[in-house]
Amino acid sequence: MAFTGSCAIILRFSNLKTVVRSGSNVSAITSNVTHRLANTRLYATEHNDQATKKDTEKLEKPMSKAMKAYLERAKQHDEFMVNQTQDYQIGKRHLANIMGEDPDEFTQRDIDAAIEYLFPSGLYDRKAKPMFKPPEEIFPKRKAAEFDSSGRPYHSMFYTCKPNYYQTLYDLVEKFNSLNEFEDRMIQKGLSPDPENAIDLTGSLWMPKAEIEKLILEVLNDHEYAYLVTSLERLVDHPYSYTIKPEIMQYRKTLMSQTAGLIIPPLQYDANGRPFIYIVQENQQEAKSLSSAMAQVK
């Protein structure tokens, strides 16, 4: 019996040792798994930090010297125009005070009249005469920055080399298609365009190439200018072109009528009741000669 009890005690101790050994193995496995998870988290964190650092380096990529110079020139030009506009407004107020006018209601026409009065000139060329104009009319316009600091262009047609020109042609095609759709709707309603509403281009002509270049701020060759004029003429020929007359007329130059600046003196009558007018003529030999023209009265 004593031997049997001793065997039982030894067996219990053996089972306990096995349990303790199993617990140690479980602890070792758990510790190993925890260590592996910690290493995985550390690697993931380091990997994310490296990726973020690379993205930051890409965003902070230095600009080229040419791009820096371009943006700097554009910034300087904008600042220059702002300063010139401020000087113009100050000079305008001083000029209004000199002429005894209200500075807030002093228009450009009043400015031109005041300059002509204060600085009379006998020169015939208008560009040689004294003038006081807004900076936008004196200094040539320049294109704004066409791309951002990363080098991406703002305009979708930047790579055509003449984005404003091709954008103008694109807009003309869009207007032509819109007029065609409008014409289709009118046909479905059984309506036809009124010939009396057709655009009358009498007294105006297409702007010359030099003025078109100033308008779009790009240099054109003769073929490009002719193609633009042809496109505009085709748009004018559309039966419903009168609906977009302002858009068409911005490319035309109004001619001044010969009688627009002519001042016709009133008729005078002699003792016999015949009407006549006095005509003042300039002559190189005589300062002025005064003559009268008799009107034929039927």
Image (spheres, rainbow, N blue to C red):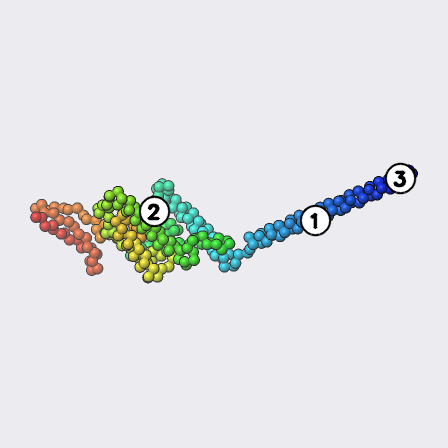
Q: Position of residue 58 (x, y in %)?
A: 56, 54
Asked which secondary structure carries label 3, the reply is: helix
Q: Residue at x 25, y 49 (%)?
A: 239
Q: CA distance from mark 3 to mark 2?
A: 127 Å
Tell whether label 3 touches label 1 (CB within 8 Å): no
Q: Would you name the residue on which mark 2 appears?
A: 108
Q: CA distance from mark 1 to mark 3?
A: 48 Å
Q: Would you name the residue on which mark 1 appears?
A: 36
Q: Position of residue 52 (x, y in %)?
A: 60, 51
Amino acid type, callout 1: Arg
Circle 2 packing at 10 Å, graded few (<14), some (14-19), many (20+), is few
Q: Would you name the residue on which mark 3 appears?
A: 4
Q: Residue at x 33, y 52 (%)?
A: 173
Circle 1 packing at 10 Å, graded few (<14), some (14-19), many (20+), is few
The reply, left or right, for residue 294 in relation to residue 21 is left
The one of 3 and 245 positioned closer to us in this rendering: 3
Disc 3 versus disc 2: nearer the observer: 3
Tell whether label 2 touches label 3 (CB within 8 Å): no
Amino acid type, callout 2: Gln
Amino acid type, callout 3: Thr
The one of 39 and 176 positioned closer to us in this rendering: 39
Asked which secondary structure carries label 2, the reply is: helix
Residue 288 occupies quadrant: bottom left
Q: CA distance from mark 1 to mark 2?
A: 81 Å
Asked which secondary structure carries label 1, the reply is: helix
The numbered mark, 1 or 3, whose residue comes first in the sequence reads 3
The one of 215 and 277 positioned closer to us in this rendering: 215
Q: Residue at x 21, y 49 (%)?
A: 263
Disc 1 versus disc 3: nearer the observer: 3
